[in-house]
Image (tube, rainbow, N blue to C red):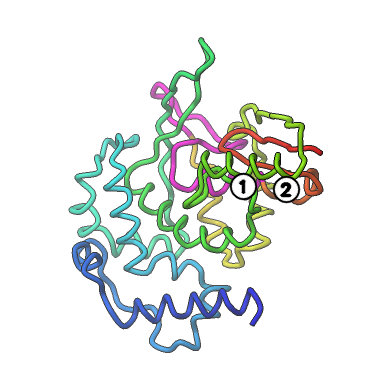
Amino acid sequence: MNATESRFKNRQLHIEDYLQMVSAEQKEYAEVFDYSKIAEKSSVITDYWTDNLLELILRKDNLNKAYKRVKANKGAGGIDGMQVDELPLFLRENQDTLIQEIRNGKFKPNPVRRVEIPKETKGEFRKLGVPTVVDRVIQQAITQELTPIYEEQFSENSFGFRPKRGAHDALKQCQKNVNEGYVYVVDMDLEKFFDTVCQSKLIEVLSRTIKDGRVISLIHKYLSAGVLANGMFERTEVGMPQGGPLSPLLILSRLVDTFSSRILNPMRLLLGNYSIAVVLP
């Protein structure tokens, strides 16, 4: 069985488990999102994965998991002022409309709220974009389905924004590289990468893997939703705001495409959150 077949089989088992049972955790949030099952026969699961990714994103258990994650993360509200503790009532009253708008391609994300936080360098600030809590749930639902897909493509030497990976794992890899005879390290910082990434190129990279055009369209809407800064709307034709659940995955897919696959593939490449370390013999 090759990797693609294994992935499809695992995804099929995942959906079948969802269709057959509701865990105690899901029951706790069952009243937030509640609509009928998307499929009754396992034979359609493979097609859903390739051509109907949006349906997987919008299934009940995935949305409930996304809601729970947003609730646990807390955080301030976006431009509409809605807070996380207001989500359950809003979603119960508006879930059908919200899901239908996303399915029909009529959903329009809100602009993010501009927040600036100080960097370690004195006088410099990092620009963040805070999505509304509803947009955070949708972005989180997208991320949960895309993450296992892209995890198979990401390098073993990539540690930033990865599940169950972090700085300590990167240090262990560095030690391993040293033990193998690599003695030079080139540390590079990608200045303002979030702010300057080419959106059309990012969409092109994503489209190589994501075949459901509705998902690509939804992601593009989030990229171009704009920013509200000091009460003034700003278009976002270049770059992407930091601060939403989806942005780390999108930026990592672009990083890996740019550096791991094309430029530095022959070298030992360690991808961190905002920097790259190249280990040379």
> Is label 2 or label 1 in front?
1
Provide the secondary structure element on which disc 2 rests: helix
Tag 2 and tag 1, C-beta contact below 8 Å? yes
Q: Position of residue 6 (x, y in %)?
A: 58, 77
| Image quadrant where residue 185 sits | top right
Q: Which residue is mark 2?
A: 260
Q: Is residue 123 left or right of residue 81?
A: right
SS at circle 1: loop
Residue pictured at 46% horizontal, 18% vertical = 118
Identified at 22% across, 62% down, the residue is: 29
Disc 2 marks which amino acid? Ser
Kind of residue at disc 1: Ser
Residue 75 belongs to the span the image colors magenta: no
Task: Using the image, determine if residue 128 lies above or below residue 143.
Answer: above
Q: Which residue is mark 1?
A: 158
Dividing the picture into quarters, in which one does residue 209 lie?
bottom right
Quadrant for the C terminus, please: top right
- The residue range painted magenta reads 227-255
How far across and down, in percent of the image, does residue 7 sit? Answer: 56, 74
Quarter of the image where the N terminus is located: bottom right
In percent of the image, x 25 and y 69: which residue is there?
Answer: 34
Q: CA distance from mark 2 to mark 1?
A: 9 Å
Is residue 53 found left or right of 137 in the rendered image? right
* Mark number, residue 127: none
The image quarter containing residue 39 is bottom left
Mark 2 vs mark 1: which is more N-terminal?
1
Residues packed near mark 2 inside 10 Å, few (<14), some (14 to 19) or many (20 plus) = many
